Image (cartoon, coloured by chain):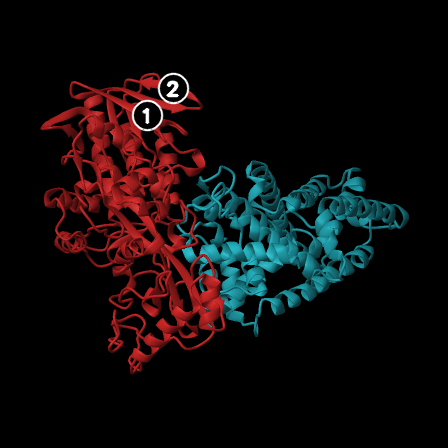
Chain colours: A red, B cyan
Amino acid sequence: MSDNPDIVVIGGGNAALCAAITAAERGARVLILEGAPKAYRGGNSRHTRNFRCMHQGPLGPLVESYSEDEYFEDLIKVTGGKTDEGLARMVIRSSEECLPWMEAHGVRFQPSLSGTLSLARTNAFFLGGGKGLVNAYYRTAEALGVEVKYDAQVTHLEVDDGQVVRVEYHQNDLDFALSPKSVVVASGGFQADTDWLARAWGPAAKNFLIRGTPYNRGVVLADLLDQGVEQVGDPTQCHAVAIDGRAPKFDGGIVTRLDCVPFSIVVNKHGERFYDEGEDVWPKRYAIWGRLIANQPDQIGYVVIDAKSIELFMPSVFPPIEAPTIEALAEKMGLPPAALRQTVDGFNAACGDTSAFHPTELDGVATKGLNPPKTNWARPITDPPFYGYSLKTGVTFTYLGLKVDERAQCSIGNRPVTNLWAAGETMAGSILGQGYLAGFGMTIGTVFGRIAGQEAAAHAN
Amino acid sequence: MQIDLIEEARRQAQICNACRYCESYCSVFPALHANRSFADGDIVQLANLCHNCRGCYYACQYTAPHEFDLNLPRALAEVRQDSWKDFAWPKGFGALFDRAGVAIATALVLGFALIFALAQALRPETGDGFYAYMSHSLMVAIFAPAFLAPLFAMSVSLRRYWHSVGGGRVKLADIWAACRSAGRMKNLEGGHGDGCNFEDEDRFSQARRHFHQATLYGFLLCFASTTSGTVLHYGFGLEAPYGFLSLPKLLGVPGGLLLCVGTAGLAWLKTKADPELGAKSAWGGEMAFILLLFAVSATGLLLYAATGTAAVAVLLPLHLGTVLAFFLLTPYSKMAHGFYRMAALTRDSARHTA
């Protein structure tokens, strides 16, 4: 069948699978071309963990209700208004029917979780995380007769007179070409292509870590943009957070996050502070710190805490660097000891009454006369042993993508490409202009994946 | 205990603790997440709490070829196996775990030979049913110590386990909680009730859970059958052979059938499952144990079916030989897992109720 499938789905993550399943259920013969080997299938969906879902009453694992307006307001807060309201509201409204659909297609949710943000009302967590979801969808897709080719990297889509006439891909050192009736692109952003990142962001991007799959290199995205397919999203921007500097270059995922910044001072490689560590609770600040670190020399920062704070945050994958004195810690972390000593002394001297310290609330325990100030959780760093972590910028996703309409269709100028649809991260820039809302990426992928599958099948049948 | 096995499990547990995506699969993760760091005893407890359902492995984004190379089911299986060796009493007998297949085969041959020889040499003058081949008192003389001595050895091991995992005073409520968990194999439910991953990679199924339950309940029924026979014999002066509608047979026949089906199913599943997700060195011994348990039940049923025929002369020593091997090797074979698992579940319940 792979000689002439009705539909080729490019990519193998959540959006691709939702599209493939939906199309196969409508009777289309579907081929998935997944660029990664089987062990790495699923793109960035492997690293996800939840789905943000509107609901008018208790739904699946979700308690109470979460209205369209509240959801939309949450979105506007993080995107600063850079949002297509029509598409965003469509995604939000559709999310409610997605959750039962996901369950019916094998996804299982967790009842409630320890040690995480309290999201039991807004976000449904996948049992086992995103790879569990991906596994379930592959099982469902294969049972519906969807064919999957792994290690199959699409190199070119030939667009001619407003339609895709050929899909070229590379597998096992051989080149193949197909001419399906419909094509769905769901192959993510370009963040794993660090050359592209460096062109967009500047040379500093070479020092960024990529939190997700090394297979999202944006080959299909670049190929389509080169042929004039409409684009959306700031091409120079990526969503980045501050993560453990010892994380692997690619694919470190959730375990590399570090939640200790609010209880610390953060210095650059010269041992100097550069920003208010206590500005807000960490979930509202980790993205800002991704950018702050990116602007420091060598794109690296160093967190310093003392024994008082070591149990106040989620354990991270790597143990902290530990030393009995500030100077010894500086030595171990490759920082100038005298400079770090001076910074810590200056900070400690600026700390006042700490009796109101409260680790999970903005407690107003602030420094006086220090620049930059620390406006919450400012306790002197005095109790040995002292602990340190390095911080680097970890890229989650890129905003540049394919512009789609509410039917997930791509276009050239004002003319739709008659047989090309896009879903997931590769078109999320149509909705998410900046910032990020936890669990919204999976919602976009699920909603648009299903729409793309439906439209592609309707066109093919 | 081998420190490198503990170290590896600790390395992986720390990664799991920073991730927490697997929280609902089984009892291991809530217990793991309750710690910030892991003492050796914590790792041993987690290892014995793990039922090897493999849900966490197939859902893990950090398995090889990822450089974190997570394989928690194997890491815990290896610590678990090693902990049983270490806790075994008398010391030195733990080495039998490494040669469980050979040990089982040897015990079987010797058990059969011993009982066959005794049955021949000391054949009673009178007696009904199998007592025509071996007297009740001789059976008691062999099996009372063969049953009690391993139980004593097991109890010494369990005390050592309990001490090493920091267990406090044992509470009845915690034992009851452990029984309830094991009684429905909650830890093979997968958290969502779809079962576990075993015979077909990431597909969830109830096969292992159901075959294990058939084995467990079959075994308990057989045990109850023997116990009821003892009670009838000593308490009521009612001696074997018992009719089909007697308590020992009403318990024993369904028990034997369940045990046969359960062990055959478990053996079949084991050939399908990926050995890389368990303690590879233990695979042969585990398989030998399952087959031994199958032999116990199958020969028991055959013996009953052959009542009154000459085949009893061979089937009786065969059955009793398998039972003897099973009893004697309980503390040094896969059978020990039941005891440690109950201890781990009891300890875990205490963590909640503390």
Residue A122: give x, y in percent of width and height.
24, 55
Side (left or right) of B41 relative to B292: left
Q: Is residue A107 above or below residue A308?
A: above
Residue drawn where x is 41% and y is 77% of the image: A382
Side (left or right) of A370 relative to A412: right
Residue B341: give x, y in percent of width and height.
57, 58
Give whichever of A144, A151 is nearer the camera: A151
Image quarter hosting the N terminus of chain A: top left
Residue drawn where x is 26% and y is 28% of the image: A223
Q: Is residue A133 above or below residue B45?
A: above
Q: Secondary structure at mark 2?
A: strand
Q: Chain of mark 2?
A: A
- The numbered dot on residue B215 is none
Q: Residues within 10 Å of mark 2 (few under 14, many from 20)?
A: few
Q: Chain of mark 1?
A: A
- Residue that extends furthest to the right in the rendered view of this protein: B121
Side (left or right) of A265 relative to B237: left
Could you tell me the amino acid type at mark 2? Asp
Residue drawn where x is 80% and y is 40% of the image: B314
Q: Secondary structure at mark 1?
A: strand
- The numbered dot on residue A155 is 1
Report which residue position mark 2 lands on.
A175
Residue drawn where x is 78% and y is 58% of the image: B140
Give whichever of A237, B353 is nearer the camera: A237
